[in-house]
Amino acid sequence: MKTKLTLIKIFSLLTAVLAFTFSACKKDASGTINITGKWAIQQFQGIQQYEFKNGNQFQYDIIATDSVTKKIIGYRFRSTGKYSIKNDSLIMFDQVNYSNSKNSYGPVTELTPVDGPKTAAYGLSLNGQKNKLSLYFTCPFNASCVASPMVFDKQ
């Protein structure tokens, strides 16, 4: 019972924080958030990078880079597809996923198609300078998830 009350308190706090964050979100003249460009976050041994392109196409990569030159030295995962933004929500769909069969970093040519989600949805917000993109998600019960939000820097 005590665990249930704690979870309710955490959920209530998270809801309040998300409501505040979304109300402060900056939008362009058309009323939607413009996230076109590259966004990256350093995680563990690699970099997660989204590229949101004109025409509502996206590419997501997990890559390794040279620490000095910053050039890509290997790919571990890639997802491509389409995206839309509706009411501070990012919906990615028609996703095609690729992974390195050796479960390590290698040339992009070593990525092979794998089963994976075809659709993903996140809450999103940009900071005032429009150089940090926050993606919010709900971690399923009893799952081991990275903390939400994930904050990506404009490249």
Image (cartoon, grey):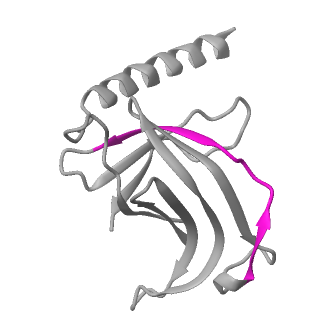
Overall secondary structure of the magenta stretch?
strand
Task: Report the residue at 74% width, 82% height from top.
Answer: 110
Front one among 113 and 148:
113
Span shown in magenta: 110-126
On whether residue 68 falls in the magenta region, the answer is no
Residue 119 shows in this picture: yes
Name the spot of residue 140 as percent of width and height, x first.
Answer: 68, 32
Residue 12 in the image, given as x and y percentages of width and height: 47, 16
Q: Quadrant of residue 74?
A: bottom right
Q: Is residue 45 visible?
A: no
**Looking at the image, is 79 positioned above or below residue 101?**
above
Q: Is residue 155 above or below residue 153?
A: below
Residue that appears at 39% across and 27% down: 18
Looking at the rendering, which quadrant does residue 115 occupy? bottom right
Tell me what residue is drawn at x 35 percent, y 57 percent: 36
Quadrant of the snapshot with the N terminus: top right
> Does the segment drawn in magenta span residue 111?
yes
Q: Residue at x 33, y 29 (%)?
A: 22
- 143 vs 42, left or right, is right
Relative horizontal placement of residue 85, taking residue 141 as reference (left or right): left
Say whether residue 114 is left or right of residue 43. right
